[in-house]
Amino acid sequence: MPHDLHYDELRSQIKGLIDYVRQNNAIEPSVFEKYNVKRGLRNKNGTGVLVGMTRISDVNGYTIEDGKKIPIKGQLRYRGIPIDDLVNGFINEERYGYEEVAYLLLFGLLPTEKSLLHFNQLLSQRRNFPATFKEDVILKTPSRNVMNKLQSIILALYTYDDNPDDVSLDKLLAQAIDLIAKVPLMLAYAYQAKRHYFDNKSLILHQPLIEGGTAENILHLIRPDSHFTRQEAEILDLLLCVQADHGGGNNSAFATHVVSSSGTDTYSAICAAIGSLKGPRHGGANQRVHHMMEDIKGHVKDWKNEKELRAYIEKIIAGEAYDRSGLVYGMGHAVYTMTDPRAELLKEKARALAEKTNHVAEYELITDLARLTQDILRERKGDDYHICANVDLYTGIIYDMLGIDEDLFTPLFAAARMVGWCAHRMEQVMDSKIMRPAYVYVPNNNLTYLPIADRTGITQA
Ligand SMILES: CC(=O)SCCNC(=O)CCNC(=O)[C@H](O)C(C)(C)COP(=O)(O)OP(=O)(O)OC[C@H]1O[C@@H](n2cnc3c(N)ncnc32)[C@H](O)[C@@H]1OP(=O)(O)O
Ligand SMILES: O=C([O-])CC(=O)C(=O)O
């Protein structure tokens, strides 16, 4: 179902206007210094500017001693509980963890067996769409991009909600449970529609599993034969757990806070979060990691040869290879310095899975990439510089090993993070102050109004 907005034609028509946009809008980094504006909402030492408070989760990657940033091993706590304790807890008890994590993040306490059962029942009962929604909203307007489709599905839900602008807490919680329950269906059907209409594959739509949890439903819904093993579902469940939240300052949670603070509806706020997560510097990095690895394999003859691999990574960092952004995707973090605890957890899982699924070479390429990127950047920036592998470095290879298509990498992150966004939205709506920071006006020209006949079209200095 090819659509086209014919942008090529419009782009050629506006060529001359681009120079105005560039010359009249670009602001040099030095101007930020001059006005003491915190670019990217960051302090000089890279730490984030304090803009809010949250009780949901805590992310630590450094301490501050005598005003100096001291790198530490990364720590992530959901409602005070270290992520490792949570994960080891449900793994040792041979249970899935995602619904428990969702309960913990939303309500601020660990569920008892009975309350977890009740919560699972609520999710199961909401894991469906209104009659003809699938056909009208998903199949009739498929998208090449599942993240984009997730946004349009969620916006469409507004129309099916009899009081969508109600921002009372019980309504927000009901919407949260509904979105968490429905997101596996949204991403699976959006993906199946993409495969059918854009990739010429058969259209296979399964009904959700009434008894299954989130991870099981995702595997069941995205796979044409709907088959999955317990071990596969446990791995996906783990990925969902570690991606469920990341404090209030991460770009998509912050977007949720900002948009929610205006008093708008849940669907609008969650769409903003999805748009943010899609970006390659945020959740979209997992897809970029996948592409970058393919690019490396295509350009480095012997990617087991450290010298050859290092030379190519240097080219990526110099902005001369891959997407020319200068970024090694899956590396670096705004908070973590020495380690990202989720990457540490997933690294172990990925190794075990790689051995089982014959992906050891790919796994080693990933770990070599992380080590060499650290070496190269530290050599260039000095011993005080710290960069670590982030969660996105390992999620991609694990999805790959589970046979999950790259189209779904970032949407799966969105499915996991839906819980965090909903929890942050409720937290924000309880504090009814609109977010409205200040911007300094820094004109690069001083225009005065001229009658149209007197204008030359040349920017006045
Ligand atoms: C779920 C998540 O969102 S996790 C993050 C996923 N994103 C990625 O994997 C994309 C690649 N990584 C990045 O773009 C960045 O590391 C971010 C966006 C995650 C963090 O950005 P920042 O906090 O602004 O990075 P930071 O200020 O620590 O960077 C310091 C320096 O290291 C460089 N750097 C940071 N990450 C990378 C990277 N992945 N590759 C190359 N250089 C990097 C920066 O360019 C900067 O150099 P400069 O001082 O010469 O300008
Ligand atoms: O915290 C951040 O900046 C990015 C993020 O969401 C994560 O790492 O999960």
Image (cartoon, rainbow, N blue to C red):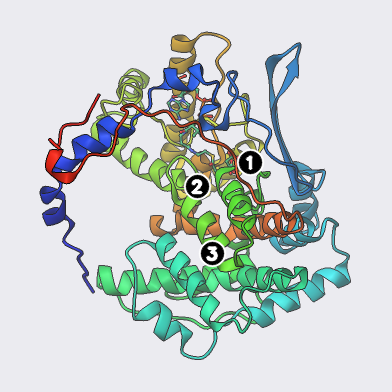
Of the two numbered discs 2 and 3 in the rendering, the one whose residue sits closer to the viewer:
3
What's the residue type where badge 2 is placed?
Gly
145 horizontally vs 414: left or right: left
For residue 268, which numbered disc appears in the image? 3
Residue 443 visible within the image: yes
Q: Earlier in the sequence, mark 3 or mark 1?
A: 1
Distance CA(mark 3)–CA(mark 1) = 19 Å
The mark found on residue 395 in the picture is none
Query: Quadrant of the image for the N terminus?
Result: bottom left
Q: Tell me the element at label 2.
A: loop
Binning the other alpha carbons within 10 Å of mark 3 as few (below 14), some (14 to 19) or many (20 upward) gives some
* In-front residue for pair 208/29: 29
Which image quadrant is residue 141 in? Answer: bottom left
Q: Which residue is identified by label 2?
A: 283
Asked if disc 2 is less than 8 Å from ligand 1, the answer is yes
Q: Quadrant of residue 99?
A: bottom right
In the rendered image, which residue does mark 1 sit on?
Answer: 249
- Asked if residue 269 lies left or right of residue 118, the reply is left
